Structures are given as C-alpha cells and as structure tokens.
Amino acid sequence: MEGIRNEGFVEVAVVEYPGGDPSAASVLAEMAHVANRLAQQQRRPCKRVLVTRWIVPASNTGVHRIAGAEMLDAAIPAVIALPGQVSSSTSVRAEDVLLDWLRAHYDGGSLLAAAGDGVSVLARAGLLTGRTVSGPDLNRHPALQVQVGSWAPSERALVDDGDLLTVGGAQAWRFLGLRLLYRLHGQGVASAVAQQLGIVVPVGIQQDLERFSANFAHGDRDVLKAQRWLHTTAARGATLGAICEISGLEPRTLQRRFLKATGLRPIEYCQRLRVAKAQTLLQQGASIDEVAWGVGYADQSAFRRLFLRIVGMTPANYRRHVSSKRRDRPLTPAVAGSLRGLRASPGTQLGRSAA
C-alpha cells in the first residue's frame, strides 16, 4: 500500500462502522478545530489536524472517505480512529472488508486508535495479540479472549503503545481525542482544549503527559518493523544486532534511517521506551529496585541517572510527584502504558551499554 501524506495536514480518519457512534467524527472535529486555532495563536510549527469520515458502504466494496476532503491525496491516513458503540445493547459488527482495510493500513504505518467497544474491532482484525490494551468489557465480548490469544486487559483507562492507542471507560472518545492532540500538538494545546471544552480528566489518566510518544508515521517500513518489535517486547533483548535482524538493515544503514524516521538513534529510542515503562511501574507502586530490574537495568545508579536526564527528576521524586497529583485536582490527560510483571535480563544491552 502506497500513499503520500499531505504536507499541510495530519489526517485523522474516523471510521463509521456498523454499530459505531455516528456522532464521533463531529466531536473529534470540534476538538481538532479548537486545537488548530490554539496552535496557530501560539505560533506552533505543526501541521493542522483534519478529521475525516470513512464509511463501509452497504455494497461492501471497500472503506471509503466521504467527500469533503479533496485536498488530501494520501491513501494512508496518519491516524485511524474507531469510536465505541451507540448503546450497550448493540453488538459490534465488523465486516471482513473493514478488518482487511485496518490490517493493510496498520502495515502501512497508520496509528490505530479505538475507544470502548471499538477496541473489539481491532481485536477481530488480529492486531492486539500480546498487547496490553484498555477498552471493552470482556463480559460483553467473551469470544475476544479466544480471538486475541494473549489478551492482556489493563486496569488503566488509557494505554498508548506507540502504534496502538486504546481507551476505555466513560468519556473514552474525548480522552482518546485529547491524547491524539497531545501527540500531534503537544501538552499545552491538549490541556487548553480540555479546559476550553470543559472536559474533566480523572486522576486515573491525567498523569505522565510527557511520556514518550513514538513517531510511526514516517513511511520507512523497515524501521517500522523494528519499532513494533521494540514496543511488543518492551525493548527487552534489544541489542543493535537484534534490531538489525528484525529490520533487515545493516548497522550503519539502520542508525541513519532510524534517526531520520524517528528523530532518535536506536539506543536513545530504547532508553526512552524503557523509561516510559518505568514511569508506569512507579505509578503502580513498585520499588525503585524492582523498576530498574524490570526495565533491564542491573545497575540502579545508571537507571537513576538515565531517568533523571529524560524525565527531569529522580525516580523517587517522580513517584512522590505522582502520589501528590493523585491527592490533588485533575489537570490534564495522560498516556498510560501497562507493564505488569515485566522482568528483563540484567544483561540486556544495546551497543556497549544497556539501552
């Protein structure tokens, strides 16, 4: 699948699948409009977010963009978003043509985002195996555990895994929108949108707005394969040789193309990914020793130095900061990644030192 993204816009494609909330696109479009205006006022050098509607025709001939976005010549939207259902009495339907379309665009580099029962559509497409997700009530979808295989539901309301974003609970669609705006426009704009539209963000998903958010929309498929392996393995075993093997690239070529695609060298990328996982473990109350070991650092002092450099505070101060926010008011949305039970070999290295 090939396509060139428009240089002036970031397309967020809202899929109006059978059973899905038909008002979702208008809600997200309002949020994007406010965000674009605020970004322009702040003179932020970023692309405008354009929300488009995509439907599955009754003829089942494919998934098509509804007219009205002629300025977009891209075949691959940067983001594909699946809303939840209109009511709990409606069963989710997902035709094969939609599932094939989602798989193809996921392979093409689109970020897939789903709220509530929309997550079950991603599950039916076979895209959540081994992933930790938030979303549907499995009591309503008992077959999903079989279809997904390694279904790992998170207790957290929002899980951003880089190439997959899932949100559950009340107001899931709006929180999904806020997380997308944070990724596309930054924390300041996303927080201002929440304030202007009166979106109250609960404490459970307000933390860690500055958690690492990877770029998957660069179009380099070899780098994309490496990124997805790193995210599904939490960067465990992430030697430079292993990343080269997954991507099919020679070391020098990998370093060059990885930096161009993501803005980070492979070692920096793994470090940020592991620190993001460490933030989650600290939020869950794990000790600093457990966290350091869990994300692959046998040397706790090296872990502390890395955490301080990336987050701007020590692990101990970060945990106190998170605890104080729980006691205070909710301010902003946040990404949450789940890393329950993560154990990594203390010898995991990338290059000369642990990534």
Image (cartoon, helix red, strand yellow):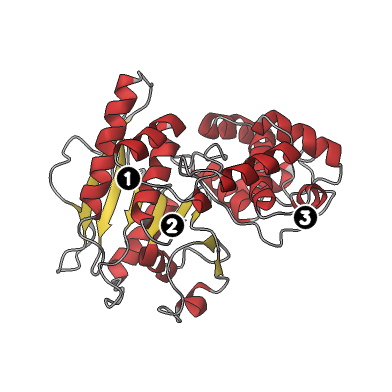
Disc 1 designates what residue?
A: 77
Q: If you read the primary sequence from the N terminus, does the residue marked by circle 1 or circle 3 appear first?
A: 1
Say if 90 sits above or below 189 in the image. below
Q: Position of residue 303 (x, y in %)?
A: 79, 39
Q: Which mark is residue 166?
A: none
Q: Position of residue 292 (x, y in %)?
A: 78, 47
One can see residue 22 in this view = yes
Q: Position of residue 149 (x, y in %)?
A: 55, 74
Q: If you read the primary sequence from the N terminus, does the residue marked by circle 3 or circle 2 appear first?
A: 2
Front position in the image: 171 or 9:
171
Viewer-nearest of labels 1 and 3?
3
Q: Position of residue 136 (x, y in %)?
A: 42, 69
Measured Cα–Cα span from mark 3 to mark 2: 27 Å
Front position in the image: 187 or 110:
187
Which element type, helix, strand or loop, lies under badge 3? loop
Q: Are marks 3 and 2 in contact (CB under 8 Å)?
A: no
Q: Are marks 1 and 3 in contact (CB under 8 Å)?
A: no
Q: Identify residue type, mark 1.
A: Pro
Would you call the spot at circle 2 few (<14 residues within 10 Å), some (14-19), or many (20 or more)? many
Q: Which mark is residue 344?
A: 3
Left or right of 294? Residue 162 is left
Q: Identify residue type, mark 3.
A: Ala
Q: Quadrant of residue 217?
A: top left
Look at 36% across and 64% down and name the residue there: 118
Which element type, helix, strand or loop, lies under badge 2? strand
Q: Quadrant of residue 195?
A: top left
Look at 30% across and 36% down and name the residue there: 196
